Amino acid sequence: MLSALYSDGAEIDDLSAARQLELLRRGALDAGLLALPEDADGLRVVVVSERPLGVLVSDAHPLARLEDVGWDDLAGLDLLLYERKLAPGYHDALLADCAAAGWRPAHVRAGPPRRSLFVAELRHGGDVVALRPQEEPAEGLRWLPLREAPVVRHALVWDPAHEFSDRIAALI
């Protein structure tokens, strides 16, 4: 888990969606930011971003030569994805989107939780891709637009009974 302590005492933690929801329900977390869908019953959920997914590959991968990628280009490739227990709703929805588009990954590899290990797996893991929203790729990786891409929605989530609920809502 990564964390940072700011001068005002606020702490930011890098937590899985499942852990955020657990802590929110126990009152041990003020607010969370997670990819939807997740089971957030009883919590306030406000979508703060919607971004199409693209394909992240090693810059040595054959797909890296393309300008964009279609679902048929992914045939026979593995998908690098975090363990289901970390964000079961999003994990299942992403695989359902892949199936609806006609792509069933050869294998779904459980990606390591740390970014550096995830990047190494993509760079040196062979016929593997990841589906991610556009960001500046790490060295040795290339992000490609995916035609007919599903959209990932990120939401700010908090307990409406939290003592600072109004202040959290004002952030939006």
Image (spheres, rainbow, N blue to C red):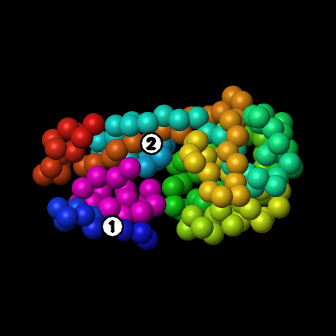
Q: 47 or 116: which is nearer to us? A: 116
Picture coordinates of residue 144, whole percent (x, y): 70, 40
Quarter occupied by residue 160: top left
Determine if residue 23 is in view: no
**Which quadrant of the structure image shows residue 133?**
top right
Give above or below for 129 relative to 83: above
Nearer mark to the viewer, of 1 and 2: 1
Find disc 1 in the rendering and name its residue.
Answer: 4
Q: Nearer the viewer, residue 17 or 52?
A: 52
Q: What span is in magenta? A: 12-33
Is residue 163 shown left or right of residue 153?
Answer: left
**Which amino acid lies under the numbered mark 2 shown in the image of this protein?**
His
Residue type, numbered disc 1: Ala
> Disc 2 marks which residue?
154
Q: Quadrant of the N terminus?
A: bottom left
| Residue at 29% from the left image edge and 42% from the top image edge | 44
Query: In front here: 122 or 93?
Result: 122
Q: Which of 98 and 134 is in front in this view?
A: 134
